């Protein structure tokens, strides 16, 4: 069971930048994307300040974000690594199952993967990650080298959008 302030909250800066970007997307009517909160159950409360001191995650979350961009239903998860490879163990079975079901309903599922050592964020289609996990389950590599991501859509800070992933989404849609 993961606790608040545990390693389950890595990538908080990335998510905060995505949240700020999503606010601007909504203001400019480019999309309506919401952060999906993970349900927690408080275990220890600070009755003086009214704060939660300790809590655990009640259930597994599906993805980090879900919404609509110009009529396209999207869902995505933000991941971060300090390594020059992306460990597949950072993606959980329940996330893959949700994204697979989402795409069956004609939605677009993807990952935003931040390589902090390279200060680079990539828009990565769900199917790429799904295929890599299938290969890993059959004895293949347990991580993906950075170089394999460079053929994907890099996400940039542009026009005041800190993590302007809609540009990458647009390029992806044009190519598929």
Image (cartoon, grey):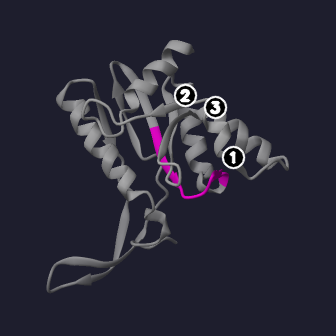
**Tag 3 secondary structure:** helix
Measure how far apart labels 1 and 2 are at the Cα level.
Answer: 26 Å
Q: Earlier in the sequence, mark 2 or mark 3?
A: 2
Front residue of 63 and 112: 112
Front residue of 5 and 45: 5
Which residue is identified by label 2? 103
Which residue is identified by label 3? 127
Which residue is identified by label 1? 145
**Tag 2 secondary structure:** helix
Instruction: Please say whether residue 69 is one of the residues in the magenta stretch.
Output: no
Residue furthest out toward the right: 139
Q: Are marks 2 and 3 in contact (CB under 8 Å)?
A: yes
Measure how far apart labels 2 and 3 are at the Cα level.
Answer: 10 Å
Q: Position of residue 78 (x, y in %)?
A: 46, 47
Q: Position of residue 164 (x, y in %)?
A: 36, 33
Identify the residue at image location x=50%, y=53%. 80
Callout 3: 10 Å neighbours few (<14), some, many (20+)?
Answer: some
Q: Image quarter for residue 71?
A: top left
Instruction: Please say whether residue 78 is one of the residues in the magenta stretch.
Output: yes
Q: Position of residue 47 (x, y in %)?
A: 18, 85
Q: Earlier in the sequence, mark 1 or mark 2?
A: 2
Front residue of 9 and 116: 116
Q: Position of residue 76 (x, y in %)?
A: 46, 39
Q: Bounds of the magenta span? A: 76-88
Identify the residue at image location x=55%, y=46%. 95
Residue 14's disc number: none
Measure how far apart labels 3 and 1 are at the Cα level.
Answer: 17 Å
For the C terminus, the quadrant is top right
Q: Mark 3 or 1, which is nearer the eye?
A: 1
Callout 2: 10 Å neighbours few (<14), some, many (20+)?
Answer: some
């Amino acid at each position: 069971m993961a606790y608040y302030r545990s390693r389950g909250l890595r990538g908080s800066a990335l998510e905060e930048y995505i949240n700020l970007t999503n606010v601007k997307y909504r203001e400019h009517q480019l999309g309506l994307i919401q952060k999906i909160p993970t349900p927690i159950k408080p275990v220890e409360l600070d009755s003086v300040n009214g704060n939660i001191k300790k809590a655990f995650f009640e259930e597994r979350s599906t993805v980090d974000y879900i919404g609509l961009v110009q009529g396209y239903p999207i869902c995505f998860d933000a991941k971060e690594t300090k390594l020059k490879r992306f460990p597949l163990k950072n993606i959980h079975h329940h996330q893959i199952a949700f994204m697979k079901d989402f795409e069956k309903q004609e939605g677009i599922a993807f990952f935003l993967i931040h390589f902090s050592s390279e200060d680079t964020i990539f828009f990565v289609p769900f199917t790429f990650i799904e295929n890599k996990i299938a290969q890993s389950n059959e004895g293949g590599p347990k991580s993906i080298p950075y170089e394999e991501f460079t053929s994907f859509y890099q996400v940039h800070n542009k026009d005041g959008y800190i993590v302007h992933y809609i540009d990458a989404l647009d390029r992806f849609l044009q190519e598929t």
